[in-house]
Image (tube, rainbow, N blue to C red):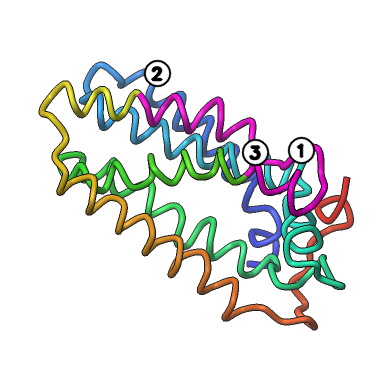
Amino acid sequence: MRNYRDNSFNVGAVLAMAIAGALALSHRRLSRPRLFSALNLAALMVHQFEEYGFPGYFPGILNAGVFKSEKPDRYPLNTNSSLIVNAVVGYPFYLLPVLFPKRRSLGLAPVLLGFAQAVFHGIVPPLSAKAPYGPGFLSAFFLHVPIGANYIRAAASERPLGRGEWARAALYMVAFAALGIGAPLQLLRNAESPYRFTERQVGP
């Protein structure tokens, strides 16, 4: 378990390649919204690899830059809470619209989160952490944003998206951000946590 905890982003990168390969073979059998939801799931795994693998110093940006932590290798974000946010909660959030493509609010919510990720990684590091670049921005901007835009276009081509669907998607995204990201970060924070990031993950 510890090995996976410390290397889940590498496993995710391999899974992203497997998903891309599977989609290359089967995309003609999928509806367009379902295809873009699956691509969005793969994009999430690439995004996480950029955050924690290469360049990989997102934990340091968040802990030291945003939260001004004196122990950025473990507080408030640590490898245990990041695993829960990224894999235990994050994967199902992006997988559900692949499994249930007709529930379009399930597909819209990860799309909205992807847009928010691009804004967050593009703005917060320079302003709060005084860092020129925040790991996660390139994958969010060049993968989540265009995939999300194409999902919206594909879903709307089948049937116009209603206000209720947009509202439910927005509420679902906010609930995910609060319960799936904020809650683990707060509940599992521990200045003496043994679940520590590497020196490379703390700073470039």
Query: Compared with residue 150, is residue 10 higher up or lower down, i.e. above or below?
Result: below
Judge depth for marks 1 and 2 and give the one in front.
1
User: Circle 2: is it few (<14), some (14-19), or many (20+) Cα within 10 Å?
Assistant: few
| Residue highlighted by disc 2 | 24
Query: Compared with residue 58, is residue 64 higher up or lower down, i.e. above or below?
Result: below
Secondary structure, mark 1, is loop
Q: CA distance from mark 2 to mark 3?
A: 30 Å
Image location of residue 31, percent across then percent down: 20, 25
User: Circle 3: is it few (<14), some (14-19), or many (20+) Cα within 10 Å?
Assistant: many
Which residue does the image show at 59% across and 71% down from the upper left? 185
Judge depth for marks 2 and 3 and give the one in front.
3
Q: Residue 78's quadrant in the figure?
A: bottom right
Q: Earlier in the sequence, mark 1 or mark 3?
A: 3
Query: Compared with residue 57, is residue 23 higher up or lower down, i.e. above or below?
Result: above
Secondary structure, mark 3, is helix
| Residue highlighted by disc 3 | 122
Instruction: Kindly indicate whether the residue at mark 3 contacts the one at mark 1 (C-beta within 8 angstroms).
Output: no
Residue 100 circle label: none
* Residue range (magenta): 121-149
Instruction: Kindly indicate whether the residue at mark 3 contacts the one at mark 2 (C-beta within 8 angstroms).
Output: no
Image location of residue 14, percent across then percent down: 58, 37
Q: Quadrant of the N terminus?
A: bottom right
Q: Quadrant of the C terminus?
A: top right
In the picture provided, is 117 more to the left or to the right than 156? right
Which residue does the image show at 41% across and 31% down from the upper left? 39
Badge 3 amino acid? Gly
| Residue highlighted by disc 1 | 133
